[in-house]
């Protein structure tokens, strides 16, 4: 199996000296098809634990400290998304002091094998994932998305002009023109990858081609970069403090947060919220700290109120999901307070969670 090589990774001794007490090693057991990052940060153990929990639950559907091989589910196609996933390598990128950006490469086998590169970015003051939308003032998000889209469109249009200038175009060139003329370019911050470099931020948007036409796609993924200073007027206060090495931590959004708490005051649980979309919908995973088995939640955030469905199983008889529980709760500062209702017995249990 061909190993995919990470591209345009900037590594230097500076970021390592800035974060000299932070180390990344391979999560064990490492193998030819599994090289996955594990963070060690002795002076900030909570940050270390939050980063490792996010990476392993989000990418491997494995809970740190649970039994078994961390790569088992992804390597055998038994995750919730069913693909076989192989991780071939990772790199720690050069970043400002408060930020950890990790690039991870691998291959996913669905209908077709497909190589991938992903980037995960963490705030080293808190251990939280850095959400792209949190970096910009709310009234500037559309403007920044417009700048990204403009750059992508220019790259595509410049290449189209080059292709169309060829005389007696071959069938291959005609197919390429069709790919780029039909290319989706209206990317939003929710729909693209990004990572921090020393003096700039890079956004990576998906390519124009589908898998079958990929061999004809000379442009591949679209990379748009901005020096930090060019986005100065759009940065949120959170981003300004993050990038200026300030220790002041500002409030950020609900997406990708970890919570700990109890059901009924006696059953400790941990919850990982996934991305919250513009319509308020989100998914989440939680587990009882004692047995460490992932349970899926599907939720909706409206204002500060959260409604969640916890499914039990899919009924072939009725062709629908059978509920296990319903959650109604409110976001109150850094807490989630509400009820977990057993769908069968209708019994209500208190739900109390606090952001880690």
Image (cartoon, rainbow, N blue to C red):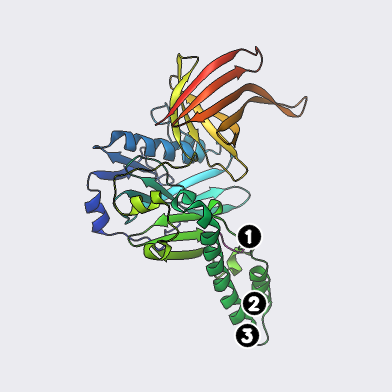
3 and 2 marks in contact (CB < 8 Å)? yes
Q: Nearer the viewer, residue 257 or 23?
A: 257
Q: Where is mark 3, residue-wise?
A: 166
Give me the C-alpha separation between circle 3 and circle 1: 24 Å
Front-most of residues 33 and 354? 354
First in sequence, mark 1 or 2: give its number.
2
Q: Position of residue 299 (x, y in %)?
A: 60, 33
Marks 1 and 2 close (CB-CB < 8 Å): no
Q: If you read the primary sequence from the N terminus, does the residue marked by circle 3 or circle 1 appear first?
A: 3
Q: Considering the numbered disc 2 on the image, is that residue within a helix, a strand or a loop?
A: helix
Label placed on residue 210: 1
Q: Quadrant of residue 289?
A: top left
Number of marks present in the image shown: 3
Query: How much space separates mark 1 and mark 2, taking CA atoms?
Result: 16 Å
Extreme residue in the right direction: 318
| Residue marked by disc 2 | 173
Q: Neighbour class for label 2 at 10 Å: few (<14), some, many (≥20)? A: some
How far across and how far down the image is residue 269, in percent? 46, 23
Element on which disc 1 rests: loop
- Residue 46 in the figure: left or right of residue 57: left
| Residue occupying image coordinates x 46% and y 33% | 62
Residue in the foreground of this view, choosing between 141 and 340: 141
**x then y, percent, for residue 236:** 43, 52
Kindly identify the residue that appears in the image at 66 percent across and 23 percent down: 323
């Amino acid at each position: 199996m061909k190993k995919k090589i990470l591209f345009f990774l900037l590594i230097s001794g500076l970021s390592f000296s800035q974060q000299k007490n932070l180390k990344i090693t391979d999560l064990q057991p490492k193998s030819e098809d599994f090289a996955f990052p594990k963070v060690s940060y002795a002076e900030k153990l909570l940050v270390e634990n939050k980063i490792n929990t996010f990476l392993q639950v989000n990418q491997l559907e494995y809970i740190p400290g649970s039994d078994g091989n961390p790569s088992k589910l992804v390597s055998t196609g038994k995750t919730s998304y069913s693909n076989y996933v192989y991780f071939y390598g990772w790199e720690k990128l050069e970043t400002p002091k408060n930020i950890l950006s990790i690039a991870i490469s691998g291959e996913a086998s669905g209908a077709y094998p497909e190589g991938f590169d992903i980037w995960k970015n963490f705030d080293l003051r808190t251990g939280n994932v850095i959400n792209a939308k949190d970096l910009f003032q709310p009234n500037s998000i559309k403007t920044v998305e417009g700048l990204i889209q403009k750059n992508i469109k220019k790259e595509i249009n410049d290449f189209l002009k080059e292709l169309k200038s060829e005389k007696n175009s071959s069938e291959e060139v005609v197919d390429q023109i069709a790919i780029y003329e039909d290319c989706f370019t209206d990317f939003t911050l929710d729909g693209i990858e990004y990572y921090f470099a020393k003096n700039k931020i890079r956004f990576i948007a998906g390519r124009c081609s589908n898998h079958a036409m990929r061999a004809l796609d000379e442009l591949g993924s679209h990379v748009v970069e901005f020096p930090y200073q060019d986005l100065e007027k759009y940065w949120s206060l959170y981003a300004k403090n993050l990038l200026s090495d300030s220790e002041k931590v500002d409030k950020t959004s609900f997406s990708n947060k970890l919570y700990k708490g109890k059901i009924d005051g006696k059953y400790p649980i941990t919850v990982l919220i996934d991305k919250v979309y513009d319509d308020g919908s989100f998914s989440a995973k939680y587990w009882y700290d004692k047995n460490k088995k992932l349970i899926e939640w599907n939720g909706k955030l409206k204002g500060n109120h959260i409604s969640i469905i916890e499914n039990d199983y899919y009924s072939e008889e009725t062709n629908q999901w059978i509920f296990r529980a319903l959650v109604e709760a409110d976001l109150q500062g850094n807490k989630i307070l509400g009820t977990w209702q057993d769908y069968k017995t209708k019994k209500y249990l208190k739900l109390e969670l606090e952001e880690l």
